[in-house]
Image (tube, grey):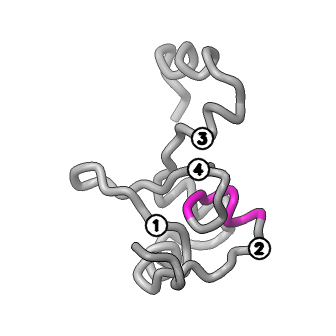
Amino acid sequence: MPPSDVAIRFASRFSDLEYQTMKLLSVKEFAELANCSARHIYRLNDARRCPKNVKLGSLTRWPARTGDPMTGVLDWLEAGCPDCRRVNR
């Protein structure tokens, strides 16, 4: 799905790092980054082996970048996918 004009204008206001910090990833986007299935992402989440998700109504999203491998998907992937079970949820 191509980004809307509003999304493009919004993203152009911020640097790439700032935009990644604000972005929330869907399970499909997370799975594509991790090179696995959406179902596997849900399994990792249920086992608390990936960064904590954010619930927005009925939607499930994951923060793209937070600077902490235990909470940001891109940070988590760059750190080699460490186990997140030890972090309080």
Q: Secondary structure at mark 2?
A: loop
Which is more N-terminal, label 1 or label 4? 1
Q: What amino acid is labelled 4 in the image?
A: Ala
Label 3, label 1: how far apart the Cα atoms are? 15 Å
**Circles 3 and 4: CB atoms closer than 8 Å:** yes
27 relative position to 30: left or right: left
Q: Which residue is mark 3?
A: 21
Q: What amino acid is labelled 3 in the image?
A: Thr
72 relative position to 74: left or right: left
14 relative position to 45: left or right: right
Which is more N-terminal, label 4 or label 2? 4
Residue 62 screen position, x and y as percent = 48, 56
Label 4, residues with CA under 10 Å away: few <14, some 14-19, many ≥20: many
Identify the image quadrant of residue 73: bottom right
Is residue 16 found inside the magenta-colored segment of the image? Answer: no
Q: What amino acid is labelled 2 in the image?
A: Gly
Label 2, residues with CA under 10 Å away: few <14, some 14-19, many ≥20: few
Label 2, label 4: how far apart the Cα atoms are? 15 Å
- The residue segment tinted magenta is 71-78
Q: Which residue is mark 1?
A: 52
Q: Which residue is mark 2?
A: 80
Magenta residues: mostly which secondary structure? Answer: helix
Residue 5 screen position, x and y as percent = 51, 14
Q: Residue at x 58, y 50 (%)?
A: 64
Quadrant of the image containing the C terminus:
bottom left
Q: Secondary structure at mark 3?
A: helix
The total number of labels drawn is: 4
Q: Is residue 75 above or below residue 23?
A: below
Q: Which mark is residue 64?
A: 4
Q: Nearer the viewer, residue 75 or 46?
A: 75
Label 2, label 1: how far apart the Cα atoms are? 16 Å
**Circles 2 and 4: CB atoms closer than 8 Å:** no
